[in-house]
Image: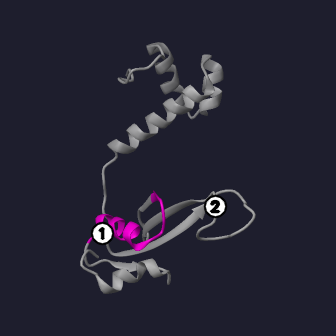
Amino acid sequence: MIYKRKSRLTSRQQTKLIEHFVAGTTARAASEIIGIQANTSISFYMRLRFLIASKLPSFELSGEVEADESYFGGVRKGKRGRGSGGKVAVFGLLKRGGKVYTAIIPDSKTTTLFPIICEKVEPDSIVYTDTFRSYNALDINPSCV
């Protein structure tokens, strides 16, 4: 398989990168083995991951579903928890005893979370959340859940 986008990598280098990707070699190690820049292999790996994710079938969660948001990142001085600088907000939906859906979100406001819940959770499902104010819209407007 040749990567269709314009690339300065030769078809042999692309094939080798794909082989290393499948084998589980890190991008940096693959770049040293093949003899290309580390950032090039990292970028190629990211494009492969995006391509694979775009081809995965979509699924909806039903029954009992848990919803929560979390913040990931290194230890920072100053404010902790919501609103702290340098942290990445991730929203997750878990079907009890089943699949998980996660998404990186810009903020944890109702206008961000509610459309994701409406898209991924089937109607008449039970959604369990914490007491965070962004989930209050589920009580007021349960039309999509």
Mark 2 or mark 1, which is nearer to you? 2
Residue 145: quarter of image = bottom left
Q: Which residue is mark 1?
A: 118
Q: Which residues are magenta?
A: 103-122
Taking depth in this image into account, of 3 and 8 the one nearest to the observer is 8
Is label 2 in a helix, a strand or a loop?
A: loop
- Tell me: residue 68, above or below residue 106: below
Residue 28: quarter of image = top right
Residue located 60% across and 18% down the image: 34
Taking depth in this image into account, of 32 and 21 the one nearest to the observer is 32
Q: How is the image coloured?
A: one colour
Amino acid carrying label 1: it is: Cys
Q: Which residue is mark 2?
A: 85
Q: Is any part of residue 119 visible from this angle?
A: yes
Spot occupied by residue 93 in the image (x, y as percentages of width and height): 43, 67
Amino acid carrying label 2: it is: Gly
- Tell me: residue 43, above or below residue 142: above
Residue located 31% across and 86% down the image: 140
Q: Which mark is residue 20?
A: none
